[in-house]
Image (cartoon, rainbow, N blue to C red):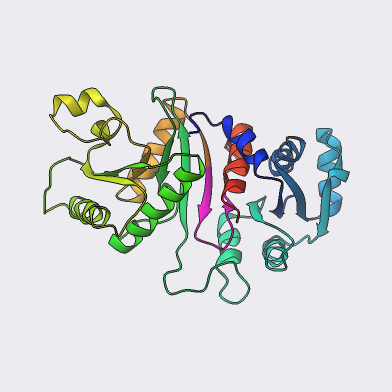
Amino acid sequence: MITKLDQLIDLAKSKGKKRLVGAYANDSHTIGAISNAIDLGIVEGTLVGDIETIKNVCAQEGIDVNKFELVQEADEAKAGAKAVALINEGKGDLLMKGLLSTDKYMRAILNKEKGLMPGTKNDMLTHMAVFEVPAYHKLLVCSDVAIIPAPDLKQKTAMLNYLVKTAKSLEIEKPKVAVVCPTEQMLTGIQSCVDAAMLCMQNKRGQIKGCEVEGPLSLDIAINKEAAETKKLVSPVAGDADCLLFPNLETGNVFYKTATKFAGAELACMVVGARIPCILTSRGDTAKTKLYSIALASLQCK
């Protein structure tokens, strides 16, 4: 079982190199992250963007430009579409956002005719984040902190299954999933509590497999055994959760920023639901976050 994010590197290397395509990779942040992943033997890299700009950035950063395959496209939106086209042509295993805006990146992925969605009625993109929080005894796989504002029960079911799949890629055999709510009590007036109870029932009846689901659980009970004991809640998930399923975007996003800015957490993150994993990091993320995100996404490749 992976308990630290730096263990992702060796695990990803053991699965063989993947081909990463950087969409509009004109910036030092993206180029540096992909270069680092190449040097560590995780991926091979294709950079789609303005070749002259890429060469200048590599010269400034002391990076050998010859380690990349370069594809010319100077227009931001067209570069996103070109990167997706390369994936569809079988020339890439995973996608990474470069300097293009998030909306253009997502638009390229979601394009109905030329995008990366499976093409089923249940198509849905969601965000997975794996946190290494110094105060917690293992990694936490969390969703959704970036994309879906107010998931309904159907979306939460899909998100829960993605959480389990991500956790299992970290060699967690039977992930413990806490469905986070404002309270551990079953209050019918709070929709997140009702959804949590429904998800637990699906798990108990075998509709959600390969994991142990508990909810509703307040966050303190999910991650702190002392809190669980104080509130007299007996559950194998309480105080030992591998995964946190948040009730809405506000909750997940505040947790993400609190964990990283106040608690010194490091993380890896990606978007799932497309035919291939898609890396979505911000310019404010650390170099480690970008590298860990590449490693995490490479583990999800088929």
Q: Nearer the viewer, residue 266 or 101?
A: 266
Measured as percent of width and height from the top left, residue 87 is found at: 69, 63
Q: Residue at x 38, y 59 (%)?
A: 158
Residue that appears at 77% across and 53% down: 46
Q: Nearer the viewer, residue 181 or 54?
A: 181
The picture quadrant where one finds residue 231 is: top left
If the image is split into quadrants, where does the C terminus sit? bottom right
Nearer to us in this view, 209 or 194? 209
Expressed as whole percent of the image width and height from the top left, the position of residue 24 reads 71, 55
Q: Is residue 13 left or right of residue 265?
A: right
- How many dots with numbers? 0
Q: Above or below — where is 9 with respect to 98?
A: above
In the rendered image of this protein, does residue 169 appear above or below residue 36? below
Q: Residue at x 86, y 45 (%)?
A: 55
Residue 70: image quadrant is: bottom right
Q: Which residues lie in the magenta part? A: 269-280
The image shows residue 111 at horizontal and vertical percentages of 58, 71
Residue 300 in sight here: yes
- Look at the image and say whether residue 60 sits in the magenta stretch: no
**Horizontal relation, residue 276 to residue 203: left or right:** right
Q: Where's residue 103, x and y in %?
A: 55, 59
Query: Relative to residue 298, is residue 40 drawn left or right?
Result: right
Q: Seen in the image, is 203 located left or right of residue 120? A: left
Q: Quadrant of residue 147?
A: bottom left
Q: Residue at x 71, y 58 (%)?
A: 92
Q: Inspect this view and state whether residue 150 appears.
A: no
Would you say residue 271 sits in the magenta stretch?
A: yes
